[in-house]
Image (cartoon, rainbow, N blue to C red):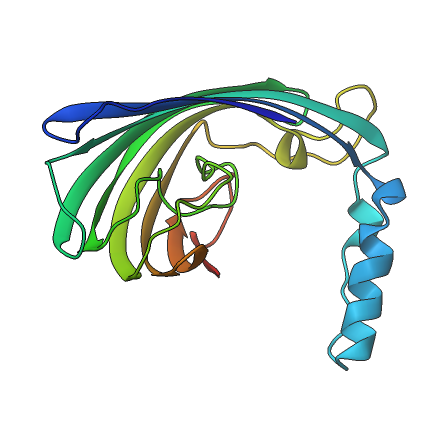
Amino acid sequence: FSLFNEKRPSTYSNAWDSLNTLELDIGLVGPYTFAENVQKEVHKQINVTRPSGWDNQLKTEPGLNLVYEWKYRHREETKANEFSLDFLPHAGLSVGNVDTHAKVGGMLRAGYNVPDDFGPPRIRPNVSGPGYVDSIEDIGFYVFAGGEQRIVGRNIFLDGNTFASSHSIDKKRFVKDMQLGAALLIGRITAAYSLVYRTKEFEGQREPDIFGAF
């Protein structure tokens, strides 16, 4: 469940836009998510190695997280059908038994017919997209690059269950994400691809994580 509060100036000439998001995430961790069944069935259907490690799965636990994020955008005054550059700093706080952290970061975007939104959607714990696409009358595109620093208080997938004994591992308190990507816009439709480099999240992790999202 999300609430958005957006404030826009009448012109982009050296002015700031802002977006505040308050979100309540409710879910479940453990066997009753049926994640084990789904992964094993998918691996069976695509004929790849049967996944292992499920004997170490966390015990069933309800998940509740309250997330607050604020984003700003600064862009010089632009007109349609021209190139532009904008800067989107952000910060946020997540509190709950699944994920507790504070974060700060920013993103640069450059392109043609860049929309009046707050960047592409991303996978948490990265700061999320705004949940809507700002339509344009023509075709547009932009490239983006950004980074984020998180201070992690709790991560149930590393710290283990809150109210029961479970497997756990020592986590790293400071985690950084660096992100590159591009987006194509056609009317009300946006297609975006991003590549994320995430520093090590726990002690003994051999390599940082690198993953893509479309």
**73 above or below 42?**
above
Q: Quadrant of residue 64?
A: top right
Residue at left offset 76%, top offset 27% = 161
**Res. 100 in view:** no
Residue placed farthest to the front in the image? 137
102 left or right of 90 in image:
right
Residue at left offset 47%, top offset 37% = 128
- Residue 133: x percent and y percent? 44, 46
**134 above or below 142?**
above
122 left or right of 83 in image:
right
Viewer-proximal residue among 155 and 110: 110
68 left or right of 61 in image:
left
Viewer-proximal residue among 38 and 23: 23
**Res. 159 in view:** yes
- Residue 115: x percent and y percent? 30, 47
**121 above or below 37?**
above
**55 above or below 24?**
below
- Residue 186: x percent and y percent? 38, 62
Residue at left offset 25%, top offset 57% = 143
Viewer-proximal residue among 135 and 202: 135
Quadrant of the image containing the N terminus: top right
121 left or right of 29 in image:
left
- Residue 21: x percent and y percent? 48, 23
